[in-house]
């Protein structure tokens, strides 16, 4: 059991080591906070106790920005796939996938995982391929016989 001198110079406790770990995770105490072990008369900084020298890992919940980046990266990938597969609205999906991918890839601090960046990059590549196929394919269908070398011959 421990007693703690708070930032308001009040003595709190006795508290358990688990409670002190929780307070460290919450930011209520830090390694410089003065602590007294039950049975001792001297106050020591929390860092002088080996069980508190390194704070235990805390399972932090995912941030809202990280979850949004993942969902937007998934949307970019889906739009990229639909831009290739859909014949009627493929151009629209291609433009949407391109825009969403660029937004995701321009943000650097919102990546909770590497997979969202990879999905956004895949969505960008697929959207570009889809847009190119929807823009170039009609050119070959409009010109009778497609482009061939005979269109570039010199006539005298």
Image: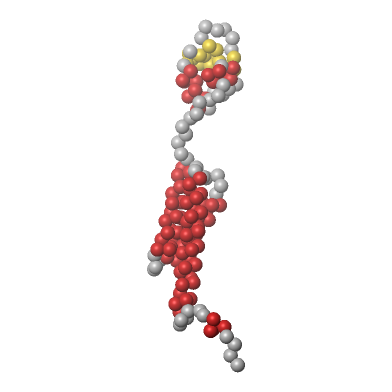
Q: In the rendering, at what x and y percent does residue 77 appear?
A: 44, 55
Residue drawn at point x = 56 percent, y = 21 percent: 53
The C terminus, quarter of image: bottom right
Q: In the rendering, at what x and y percent does residue 4 appear?
A: 53, 16
Residue drawn at point x = 53 percent, y = 25 percent: 55
Q: Residue furthest bottom?
A: 156
Task: Establish if 110 lies above or below 156.
Answer: above
Q: In the rendering, at what x and y percent does residue 34 appear?
A: 58, 17
Question: Is residue 82 or residue 62 the one in the foreground?
Answer: 82
All told, the count of numbered labels is: 0
Q: Is residue 147 visible?
A: yes
Residue drawn at point x = 53 percent, y = 19 percent: 51
| Coloration mode | secondary structure
Question: Is residue 58 or residue 118 the one in the foreground?
Answer: 118
Q: Quadrant of residue 50?
A: top right
Question: Is residue 9 or residue 34 the one in the foreground?
Answer: 34
Q: Quadrant of residue 86?
A: bottom left
Q: In the rendering, at what x and y percent does residue 32 appear?
A: 60, 21
Q: Quadrant of residue 10?
A: top right
Residue drawn at point x = 55 percent, y = 44 percent: 109
């Amino acid at each position: 059991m421990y007693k703690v001198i708070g930032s308001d110079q009040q003595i709190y406790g006795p508290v358990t080591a688990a409670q002190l770990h929780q307070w460290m995770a919450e930011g209520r105490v830090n390694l410089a906070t003065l602590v007294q072990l039950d049975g001792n008369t001297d106050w020591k900084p929390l860092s002088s106790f080996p069980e508190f020298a390194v704070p235990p890992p805390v399972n932090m919940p995912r941030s809202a920005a990280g979850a949004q980046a993942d969902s937007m990266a998934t949307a970019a990938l889906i739009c990229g796939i639909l831009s290739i597969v859909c014949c009627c609205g493929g151009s629209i999906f291609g433009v949407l996938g391109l825009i969403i991918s660029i937004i995701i890839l321009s943000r650097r601090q919102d990546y909770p995982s590497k997979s969202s960046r990879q999905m956004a990059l895949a969505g960008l590549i697929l959207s570009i391929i889809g847009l190119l196929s929807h823009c170039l394919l009609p050119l070959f269908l409009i010109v009778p016989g497609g482009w061939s070398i005979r269109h570039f011959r010199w006539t005298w």
